[in-house]
Image (tube, grey):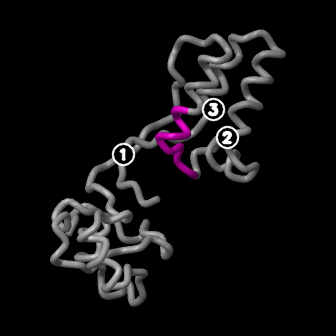
Amino acid sequence: MIPDFDYTLLPDTYTLCLHDACPRAQECLRRAIAEGVPADRTCIRILSPAAARQMAAEGCTYFSPIRKVRYARGLKNVLKQLEQLPYDRAVAAKQAIKGNFATRTYYRVRNGQRPVFPDEQADIEHVFRAFGLEEDPVYDDFIYCYDLR
């Protein structure tokens, strides 16, 4: 069980595991979350017990370590950094960043309504380097939480 886990953030589509005998159960996020599901959460998604037993023996593809990940929030400061580029290059850089997301997702990310995942942060950093910006992207904020993808 994870004492500081906020179960309101648990997506209905996140698969949990109830396999106690798994050799990695003590270090698995899916197992740890499953141990503490509150009673008001009447339905959860779990791995089939037979599949969990088989995967435990062969190396589970659903294993997720118990660790918090640093997510960025908001792109307003990142977009301000692009203003130091010549106008046409700044527009192209913004389009390159925007191209990493679906349209609605981009606006949610830009406004801080949805976090920027670590792989997306790396993509944005790559855009910075491609356009000759040597500084790191400066996001509006950072949060640390468990990776539920």
Left or right: 21 as drawn, with respect to 95: left
The residue where tag 3 is placed is: 76
Q: Give amino acid for label 2.
A: Asn
Identify the residue at image location x=55%, y=39%.
120
Q: Secondary structure at mark 2?
A: loop
Q: Is residue 115 magenta?
A: yes
Residue found at the very far front of the displayed protein = 58
Magenta segment: 114-122
Which element carries disc 1, helix, strand or loop?
Answer: strand
- Residue 125's tag is none
- Front position among marks 1 and 3: 1
| Disc number lying in front (3 or 2) | 2
Towards the viewer: 12 or 138: 12
148 lies above or below 81: below
Secondary structure of residue under mark 3:
helix
Q: Position of residue 144 (x, y in %)?
A: 36, 46
Amino acid on which disc 3 is placed: Lys
Residue under pointer 1: 69
- Disc 1 marks a residue whose amino acid type is Val
Query: Which residue appears at 72% of the width and 37% of the height?
Result: 98
Whole-percent x, y for residue 1 in the image: 20, 69
Q: Which of marks 2 and 3 precedes in the sequence? A: 3
Give the vertical position of 4 relative to 52 (above or below): above
